[in-house]
């Protein structure tokens, strides 16, 4: 990655908390009012319920949306970087199936992180990716 | 899952230099599972965002404000 091409100046970050998924529209409006040119969604069980809606909003407004989980990217968000939920769930469940007691398993950190890019989203929001970027992805969604 | 612990880690360890001990010999206290390091990796995600979308200047962060994030 040629560092000189991306902005060295720190990004301006604004926060748009919601109390429930019903507040999403208001949060998206306030994000728009802040003139943000990208959306960063903190992945959680609740935001995952509105993953599709947030991703579609990004497509309409031509804003890149980044999150932690693949599930957002398959719904149209641009990239995700984080643990694979299904992979981790299978890993832990596999041990239980092999006879370990769930209560005996300690808390663990994820063992695998994935960087996923939705190329279709990149095209539709008019983004040209640096050539090296897709090469670094673990998975590309066409 | 694990976000509460990750927030606690941020506050206790990073901001106040303390430590968190997880007693894995007495589990069943909601500490079984996988922590997803949601906070710890936010900076890395902002970095990646700037590499993918080169003209990223203003980032709007959307999140659920919840008192029961440890779920």
Image (spheres, coloured by chain):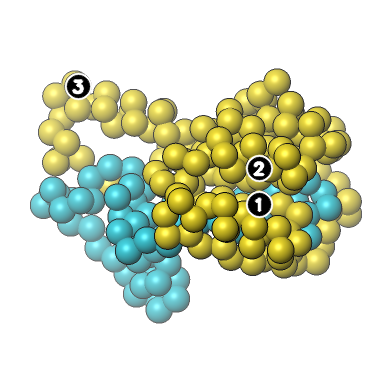
Chain colours: A yellow, B cyan
Disc 1: CA contacts within 10 A as few (<14), some (14-19) or many (>=20)? many
Disc 1 versus disc 3: nearer the observer = 1
Q: Quadrant of the C terminus of chain A?
A: top right
Q: Is residue A26 above or below residue A118?
A: below
Disc 3: CA contacts within 10 A as few (<14), some (14-19) or many (>=20)? few
User: What element does badge 2 sit on?
Assistant: helix
Q: Residue at the location (88% across, 54% down)?
A: A4
Q: Is residue A28 above or below residue A80?
A: below
Q: CA distance from mark 3 to mark 2?
A: 40 Å
> In this image, A107 relative to A101: left or right?
right
Q: What chain does badge 1 belong to? A: A
Give residue A113's position: percent from left, percent from top.
Answer: 52, 37
Disc 3 versus disc 2: nearer the observer = 2
Q: Earlier in the sequence, mark 1 or mark 3?
A: 1
Q: Earlier in the sequence, mark 3 or mark 2?
A: 2
- Badge 2 vs badge 1, beta-carbon distance below 8 Å: yes
Q: Residue at the location (15% across, 30% down)?
A: A100
User: What element does badge 1 sit on?
Assistant: strand
Disc 2 versus disc 1: nearer the observer = 2
Return the mark for residue A57. Answer: 2
Give residue B36's position: percent from left, percent from top.
Answer: 41, 47
Give residue B44's position: percent from left, percent from top.
Answer: 61, 53
Q: CA distance from mark 1 to mark 3?
A: 39 Å
Mark 3 lies on residue: A97
Q: CA distance from mark 2 to mark 1?
A: 10 Å
Q: Is residue B36 above or below residue A126?
A: below
């Amino acid at each position: 990655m040629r560092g000189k091409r991306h902005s060295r100046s720190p990004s301006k970050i604004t926060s748009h908390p919601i109390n429930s998924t019903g507040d999403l529209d208001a949060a998206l409006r306030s994000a728009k009012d802040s003139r943000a040119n990208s959306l960063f969604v903190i992945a959680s069980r609740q935001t995952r319920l509105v993953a599709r809606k947030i991703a579609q909003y990004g497509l309409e407004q031509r804003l890149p949306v980044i999150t932690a989980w693949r599930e957002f990217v398959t719904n149209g968000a641009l990239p995700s970087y984080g643990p694979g939920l299904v992979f981790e769930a299978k890993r832990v469940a596999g041990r239980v199936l092999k006879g370990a007691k769930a209560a005996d398993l300690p808390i663990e950190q994820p063992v695998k992180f994935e960087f996923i890019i939705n190329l279709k989203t990149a095209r539709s929001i008019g983004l040209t990716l640096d050539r090296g970027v897709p090469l670094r992805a673990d998975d590309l969604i066409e | 899952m694990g976000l509460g612990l990750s927030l606690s880690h941020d506050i206790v360890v990073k901001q106040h230099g303390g430590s968190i001990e997880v007693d894995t010999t007495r589990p069943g206290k909601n500490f079984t599972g996988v922590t997803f390091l949601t906070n710890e990796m936010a900076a890395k995600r902002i970095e990646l965002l700037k590499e993918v979308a080169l003209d990223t200047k203003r980032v709007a962060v959307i999140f659920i404000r919840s008192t029961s994030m440890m779920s």
